[in-house]
Image (cartoon, rainbow, N blue to C red):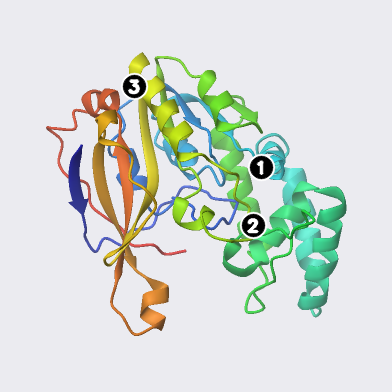
Amino acid sequence: MQLMNHTSNDHRRSDVPHPIPYQGSKRNLAPIILSYFPSHFARLVEPFAGSAAISLATAYHRLADRFIINDAHAPIIDLWRDIIDHPEDLAAKYRSLWRAQLGREREYYDIVRNKFNRTHNPEYFLYLLARCVKAAIRYNTEGEFNNSPDNRRKGAHPNTMRGRIVGASALLQGRTELSASDYREALARCGPSDLVYMDPPYQGVCKNRDNRYCPKIDHTEFCDSLAALNDKGYMFVVSYDGRTGSKTYGDPLPKCLNLVHIEVHAGRSTQATLLGRRDDTYESLYLSPALAAASSFGKKRLPQQIEFAW
């Protein structure tokens, strides 16, 4: 396993439209991740899609022709279906919700949250993610969305949100397969001309008691799935845990997988700063042997790093 480290002070923002606010989104790391992709391939597969930041960036830069966006969390996929297939309708519903909140933002958030918990309608989910604390999906033991609103903001302005929704739809409509299934089912649909990007729930979160939406991913089973992809010679890249200062999160992927391990500087730890420390956070990126070969990893220039700006 080859280990490399990337840091820089590049703060460039991307024009890629991102309609879904999402804790842990890789939209700011997308330029680094895409720098290891081949110049073109048939299809990008995201088994843990969430906000699908890498699919959007890949489509924007025309690196792939088709996409599989999968997530075990069905409301995310239902929201993606409306974004891709019914962008104007979703934008209009969001506008109505956003306007109805004005002057009673705190009260209205609870009203929409109750409606979402009854119906799981995509427009309610989008509104909640646009307004909730840290854009984090959290549920109680009864399976009800229970994250609180960030009372400092009203959510993206309807004109801004419409631009993001319509832009994402233009990138993905007509060439995207959506599914809400276990990641292994998504991997079973992969072929030799695909590239798989995986951003599974981090062990550092899911091993602790936490009420964030976090499907259980067995580390050994996940590693077995990666080994199976290697045996087929498939290209894949994995974002997986990392470290803050000297503190590491989760078990590393095993050396027997023969992956290229890259540490990506993700900026100063907010929690450490609050405690008066100056610890930086690094995320791990793992490239499969097939991807490293296809992207001429050994010959390419090291990519620049950008800081998180969410």
Q: Which mark is residue 73?
A: 1
Q: Which mark is residue 300?
A: none
- What amino acid is found at the position of numbered circle 1 in the picture? His
Q: In terms of image quadrants, where is residue 41?
A: top left
Circle 3 crowding by C-alpha within 10 Å: few under 14, some 14–19, many from 20: some
Residue on which the image places disc 2: 137
The residue sitting at 23% across, 52% down in the picture is: 304
Circle 1 crowding by C-alpha within 10 Å: few under 14, some 14–19, many from 20: some
Tag 1 or tag 2, which sits nearer the N-term?
1
- What amino acid is found at the position of numbered circle 3 in the picture? Asn
Tag 1 or tag 3, which sits nearer the N-term?
1
Tell me whether circle 3 and circle 1 mark residues in contact (CB < 8 Å).
Answer: no
Q: Is residue 99 above or below residue 142?
A: below
Residue 255 versus residue 159: which sits nearer the camera? 255
SS for tag 3? helix
Q: Could you tell me residue 116's position as x and y percent?
A: 81, 55
Tell me whether circle 2 and circle 1 mark residues in contact (CB < 8 Å).
Answer: yes
